[in-house]
Structures are given as C-alpha cells and as structure tokens.
Image (tube, grey):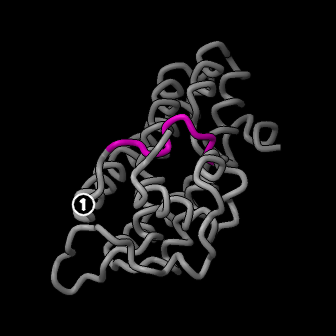
Amino acid sequence: MNYPPLHRASALGLLAALGLGGAAGCSSAAGPAPRTAEVRESAPGLSPTPSGTASATPTDAGWVQLMAPMNQQAVKLLTLAAERAAEPRVRAFAVRLRTGHETELGRLRTLLGRMGLPLTDVHAGHDMPGMVTGQDLETARAAEGTAFDRFVLARIGDHLRQSAQVSRSEITAGGRADARRLARALVTAREAFLAELERLPGAVRALG
C-alpha cells in the first residue's frame, strides 16, 4: 500500500528509533528506514502549530499515527472481552481498559487534527508490534471459556507493553509538548493496567 511520503517517513522514523523497523510490515514496502538521528528532523508539510508549540517532528507524527489505530484495534478486542470473558474480574478489567482507551483515542484524534494529519489508519494491513489484528479478533471469537480469557490477556498484555514502549520514545524524542504530555499519560495508564493484568486469573499462563 502506498502512503504519502510524510506518513511513511514518520512511521518508519519512529519504528527505527525503537529498533522495531525490521518487525513491522511498513518497512518492507518503503526501503531502508531513516536513521535514528533523523527522527528529530522536522516533518515537511505539517500544518502550522499553535503559538508556543514546537513543530511536529517525524517522531510526533509517527507516534500519533501508530497509537490511534493501536487503541482502536485494542478497543475491538476489549469489547469482546467485556461481553464474553469467563472470569468476572477479566470482564471488569476489559470494561475499564476499554473506557480508558476510548478516552485516549479521542485525545489522539484531536492531536492528529492539530498536526494536520488524516484520521485514516496508515498502518492498515501491516503487522505492527502490539497491534491487535483482524486474525486476533477472529481467533478470539472462536475461543471460549478460560481459553478465551488467556488469549485476550496475552494479546492485551502485548499491546500494553508495546504501546508503552512507543510512547516512551515520544517522551524522549518528540518535539511537541502536547504530544509528549499525552504520551506520558498513556505510559502511566499502561503501567497501572499491566500491573493489574498480571494479577488476574490466568494471567501467569497467558503471559508465560
């Protein structure tokens, strides 16, 4: 799939900084990923930012364009878990995490608008670390009982860890204060939910 150069370079720059470029589907179609040092360069073509806010770098753009679909896909799996988990504590956990992710998604979409970036998923069809895939959703729908719970906890645990890792990169390398603030909030939330997830029934086997 061909994306506008800004979207492609933004995502690849961030993934390269994280050492994830080789694991992500984005890297295969776009050639060599930018060097880590290039992540801090300003991304051409972004809309002017509000007074007092730094221009968005490829790290900022790549982060928000990755986090929005990651949250969107996670919400789909969490919705299934809220309805079908065998363990009541897993259902309650899924409901609260889904609510938090939906709130974050609204803030991420607002940030996309401020950056002049589209709301479309530029990673659609790509195998991104921590992204809940269509195949994951099919597998979850086919599972039942404790097997369903273990699968959901494993995939959501991976999502939380990977999205926290990506957000830490934004905190240290991003250029926009508003993006870094949101990234810090996301990391704090993920660390808290991961600690809770690890105490849920079946989590030890799921996270193995």
Does residue 121 belong to the magenta stretch?
yes
Residue at the left extreme, as displayed: 51
Q: Identify whether 82 is placed above or below 38.
A: above
Provide the major secondary structure of the magenta segment. loop
Q: Residue 184's x, y, as percent?
A: 45, 71
Tell me where residue 201 sits by quadrant. top right
Helix, strand or loop under label 1: loop
Pinpoint residue 106: horizontal percent, then vertical percent. 28, 50
Note whether residue 195 is visible.
no
Is residue 18 found left or right of 122 in the rendered image? right
* Residue 123 vertical placement versus 89 (above, below): below
Identify residue for label 1: 116
Identity of the amino acid at label 1? Gly
Residue at coordinates 56% horizontally, 56% vertically from top-left?
163
Image-quadrant location for residue 200: top right
Quarter of the image with the C terminus is top right
Residue drawn at (59%, 82%) of the image: 37
Q: Which residues are magenta?
A: 120-128
Compared to residue 142, the image places residue 2 above or below, namely below
Within-10-Å neighbours for mark 1: few <14, some 14–19, many 20+:
some
Q: What is the quadrant of residue 191 in the picture?
A: bottom right
Residue 126 is a magenta residue: yes
